[in-house]
Amino acid sequence: MPVTGLSRPLALLPLLLALPHGQARAQDAQPAVEAASTQGTEAVADPVDDPSGEAKKHSPWLFVPLVSSNPKLGTSLGAMVGYVRLLDPESEPSMLAIQGQRSNTESSTVGFGGKLFWGANAHQMQFGAVGGKVTNDYLDFLGTGEEVRSDEDLRGYFLRYQHRIRPNWYLGGQALYSNYDVEGSDPSSSQILDLAGLTGSVSAGIGLITSYDTRDNTSSPTEGMLFQLHNFAFRDGFGSDDDYDALTGEIKWFASTSDVNVVVLHGKLRMTADAPTSKQSTVELRGYTRGQYLGRNALTLEAEDRYMFKPRWGAKAFAGVSCLYGDGQSCGDEIYPMVGGGVFYVVKPEAHMVISAEFAKGNGDNRGFYLNFGHRF
């Protein structure tokens, strides 16, 4: 039976700044919205927006409001400021960004991160750093019926580099470090957290990653697929409190059914070995809080339809299902469904970058509203 656990800083790092994940070939980008750039400090150009047919320069700066709301973590408000550049004319747009968020539960986080593409996409790097304080309120902690309030001080760092070894194939490495302290905000909460063994920890690990990518762009693909397989080995020798392993396989498939409609399928499998409870896999669907339900392994399946009803405006509908299994529990023992919809706006057509507003509903009281940069996948 999955348990309700603390929202884990490890889960924050891959989502840091909600930067588009993965890689693609710039030469396969949509012909109608090709990116062009010169060396130096000039901005990215968008030849489509200028009726004269001449390349029109746009500001490289990006500002995005951030909103999330769910019953467990309350409502968070924040903003992201990004800087978008082409490091060379044949690569995907690179981006550096900083974001901050604060919630009505007195939680606050600040993060910095980026995605870099250079050498005609032969070299790709993703990195991030996050820090802050997270306050959690549990009305039924671990199914005990006890009310618990916890405060987490966290910081974490993430680095990933990949190199193209042959057409569409990438190989690289990654490293992750997180350190968080957990304290109960009252004596009763502290005692319950201690009994549950949730007192904070340090996780430090390294791993390998391989990818196969045929998408037409990285931010809002309309054709192609991305397959990734990667691992993390967390070891005492790297500074980790626990020795355990995590292996993740993920696939994203995109197909245009018309000039204005894209169908997306997403599947993800995360498996762990010897992981403590707080570092196990979690339900990652929209509408659920990461870290609320935990199990040794997690399987996620999602489908999404994206329809452009105006040149820069679109609507989406999505559904998914997830399960947790392992340690005597089968995938069918507990199913987590989800449905939802939303709208999105193409904020930078020259770089295929979008802002999305989504609402998702899971089982029971699980639900959430999100205003984020980029699509979920």
Image (tube, grey):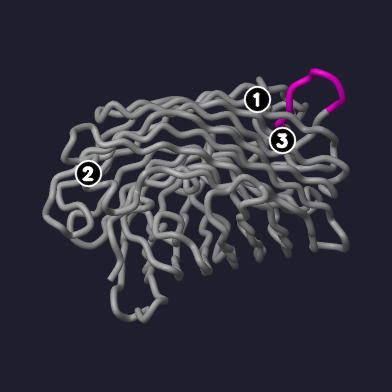
Residue closest to the eye, 340 or 210? 210
Residue at x-position 46% and y-position 54%: 307
Residue closest to the eye, 164 or 167? 164
The residue type indicated by label 3 comes to: Ser
Snapshot quadrant of residue 257: bottom right
SS at circle 2:
helix
**Residue 349 shows up from this direction:** yes
Q: Quadrant of the N terminus?
A: bottom left
Q: Position of residue 25 (x, y in %)?
A: 78, 53
Q: Viewed as shown, does residue 46 lie left or right of 248? A: right
Which residues, given as a range, are shown in magenta? 38-46
In the picture of the structure, the residue carrying the numbered disc 2 is 191
Residue at x-position 37% and y-position 35%: 152
Instruction: Identify the main secondary structure in magenta.
Output: loop
Snapshot quadrant of residue 372: top left
Q: Position of residue 213 (x, y in %)?
A: 72, 61
**Label whose residue precedes the other's in the sequence (2 or 1):** 1
The residue type indicated by label 1 comes to: Tyr
